[in-house]
Image (cartoon, rainbow, N blue to C red):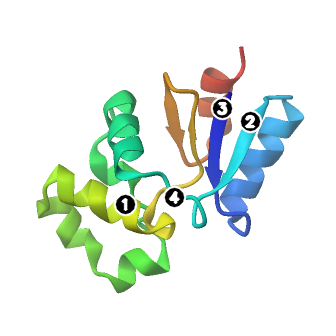
Amino acid sequence: MIKFYCYPKCSTCQKAKKWLDDNKVKYEEIHIVENNPTKNDLAEYFKMSGFPINKFFNTSGIKYREMGLSSKVKSASEDDLLELLSSDGMLVKRPLITDGKKITLGFKPEVFEKNWLN
């Protein structure tokens, strides 16, 4: 089962959810603020993704800017960044979607088509 970490008020998450529904992709919806991925989950997703750790941050989010994370993300250790991401779902790029083998961050229809259509 695909895990769909999202924030219901996020317009990007709403577009992604509509795409998944329109394409009849089954998923488990997880409210990213109420049920933020754990540090261990995020470490696993990070390794699985092949993305740089900074791609996991919601850089356009208010909390990211308020905390002045743009410079911290460049210099902090991977462990510290995973700890930070696991502390607040609003810091995590969304939607975060995984099936345990692959992961997508954000919403781009062409990326979804490649990854989530069988």
Inter-mark Cα distance, 2 to 4: 17 Å
Mark 1 or mark 3: name the one nearer the start of the chain.
3
Whole-percent x, y for residue 111 in the image = 59, 31
Relative to 52, does residue 98 appear above or below in the rendering?
Answer: above
Circles 3 and 4 in contact, beta carbons < 8 Å: no
- Helix, strand or loop at label 3? It is strand
Residue furthest to the top? 118
Q: Secondary structure beneath disc 4?
A: loop
Residue density around tag 4, few if under 14, some if 14–19, many if 20 or more, within 10 Å? many
Name the amino acid type tagged 4.
Asn
The residue shown at (35%, 51%) is: 39
**Residue 2 has which mark?**
3
Percent of width and height locating residue 63: 43, 79
Which residue is under mark 2? 27
Q: Closer to the N terminus: mark 2 or mark 4?
A: 2
Q: Is residue 71 above or below residue 27?
A: below
Label 1: how many Cα within 10 Å (few below 14, some 14–19, many 20+): many
Badge 1 vs badge 4, beta-carbon distance below 8 Å: no
Q: Amino acid at mark 3?
A: Ile
**Residue, far bottom:** 66
Q: Which residue is mark 4?
A: 36
Secondary structure of residue under mark 1: helix
Classify residue 7 by image quadrant: bottom right
| Amino acid type, callout 1 | Leu
